[in-house]
């Protein structure tokens, strides 16, 4: 089978590999579609501190079960499945409180273990979620990125009366817009980005107000509007202090970033407004929730997709995705 392997940082190859055998408790997935994420590019360039090499990348994928390992019912063969990349131990403290995404032995498929940019992938059976017929094959790999929005929203508890501000109109910002508008029914979602093309995508994905903050600071453009719910989906370390300054008293702020640079905020700026800060990593068992959103058409994953390319063109696809944020959003590989 063909697999996209990052042999070592900087070295991407489409390699011929043996098809994996599903181990006990696993299923073998014949991958059909896999979407590219910023973290795949980071692993390629050696910028992901968790990655081990050589690694088959890809954590957003969809396919069909073609074999089962010991202890898994053979009746599962033929199921159309989306794969949750979060593999957890099930018994540590975070697992015991329903947060396997920060398991003390966390293994992320496509990061710590081989992933879905491959003709076949062996994954734990419980990570393979049946995709209902209402969700087409070519969009099912986008369940995973929407689980990021679902996870942060579970912390933020959006209410229809909230005034939301989202920093960044990349894939993460766009999934958050769609969730806030389509699932939580907010009447006002404001989105800031520096690229006009990305702001246009934000509008197409449901933003009520888009603001270009490349030259004029947001404080000057918001005209006194105090957001009550803020999501940082741009993740520059300077954004937290800006969000804290712009926030309404009693607002909630959600952070998604992994930068190693310090963010500087004072206790006074947080406590005087009694702000709540939440962080969110990957997702905690949120596949069923997002599958339900998609099945009910509360969200429109197709609005994120700008390109489909064959697996063999993965380097072109990843380069396009990385270098051309003005024309690219989600790039999906067609695998089998
Ligand atoms: P992206 O790079 O495609 O999008 C970021 C957007 O933010 C770009 O459109 C950029 O123009 C804009 N931007 C940059 N600085 C800005 C600023 N100061 N104000 C407003 N907009 C600004 O990235 P993507 O895929 O949407 O991911 C966003 C972030 O989310 C990344 O940092 C990524 O590491 C993080 N992430 C976190 C996850 C988690 O589970 N916590 C999961 C996936 C991504
Ligand atoms: Mn991703
Ligand atoms: Zn655990």
Image (cartoon, rainbow, N blue to C red):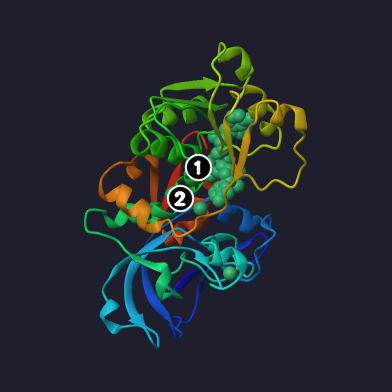
Report the side of 50 relative to 158 (left or right). right
Q: Residue at x 72, y 27 (%)?
A: 269
Q: Mark 1 near mark 2, Cβ–Cβ under 8 Å? A: yes
Q: Quadrant of residue 75?
A: bottom left
Residue 7 lies, in percent from the top left, at 63, 69
Q: Quadrant of residue 222?
A: top right
Q: Is residue 66 visible?
A: yes
Q: Nearer the viewer, residue 85 or 247?
A: 247
How many C-alpha atoms fall within 10 Å of the one at disc 2: few (<14), some, or many (≥20)?
many
- Specify which label sits upstream in the sequence, 1 or 2: 2
Residue 182, relative to residue 219: is it above or below?
below
**Label 1 lies in ligand 1 vicinity (Cβ under 8 Å):** yes
Q: Is residue 119 visible?
A: no
Q: Is the N terminus in the top left, top right, bottom left or bottom right quadrant?
A: bottom left
Q: Is mark 2 within 8 Å of ligand 2?
A: yes
Is residue 111 left or right of 269 when viewed as pictured? left
Task: Name the residue located 66 percent from the left edge and 59 percent from the top edge.
Answer: 10
Which residue has dot 1 on it? 172
Q: Residue 255 has which mark?
A: none
């Amino acid at each position: 089978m063909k697999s996209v392997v990052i042999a070592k940082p900087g070295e991407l190859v489409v390699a011929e590999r043996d098809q994996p055998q599903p181990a006990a408790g696993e299923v073998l997935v014949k991958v059909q579609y896999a979407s590219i994420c910023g973290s795949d590019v980071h692993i390629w360039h050696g910028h992901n501190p968790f990655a081990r090499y050589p690694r088959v990348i890809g954590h957003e994928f969809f396919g069909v079960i073609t074999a089962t390992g010991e202890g898994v019912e053979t009746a599962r063969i033929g199921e159309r499945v989306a794969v949750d990349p979060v593999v957890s131990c099930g018994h540590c403290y975070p697992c015991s409180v329903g947060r396997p995404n920060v398991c003390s032995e966390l293994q992320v498929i496509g990061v710590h273990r081989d992933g879905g940019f491959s003709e076949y992938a062996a994954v734990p059976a419980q990570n393979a979620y049946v995709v209902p017929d209402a969700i087409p094959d070519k969009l099912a790999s986008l369940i995973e990125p929407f689980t990021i929005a679902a996870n942060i929203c579970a912390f933020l508890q959006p209410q229809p009366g909230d005034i939301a501000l989202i920093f960044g109109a990349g894939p993460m910002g766009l999934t958050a817009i769609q969730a806030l508008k389509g699932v939580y029914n907010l009447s006002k979602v404001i989105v800031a980005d520096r690229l006009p093309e990305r702001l246009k995508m934000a509008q197409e994905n449901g933003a009520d107000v888009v603001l270009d903050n490349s030259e004029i600071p947001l404080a000057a453009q918001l005209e006194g509007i105090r957001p009550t719910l803020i999501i940082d989906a741009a993740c520059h370390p300077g954004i937290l202090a800006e969000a804290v300054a712009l926030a309404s008293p009693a607002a909630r702020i959600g952070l998604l970033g992994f930068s190693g640079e310090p963010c500087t905020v004072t206790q006074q700026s947080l406590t005087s407004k009694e702000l709540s800060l939440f962080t969110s990593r990957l997702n905690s068992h949120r596949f069923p929730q997002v599958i339900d959103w998609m099945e009910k058409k509360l969200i429109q994953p197709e609005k994120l997709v700008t390109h489909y390319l064959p697996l063999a063109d993965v380097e072109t696809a990843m380069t396009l995705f990385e270098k051309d944020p003005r024309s690219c959003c989600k790039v999906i590989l067609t695998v089998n």
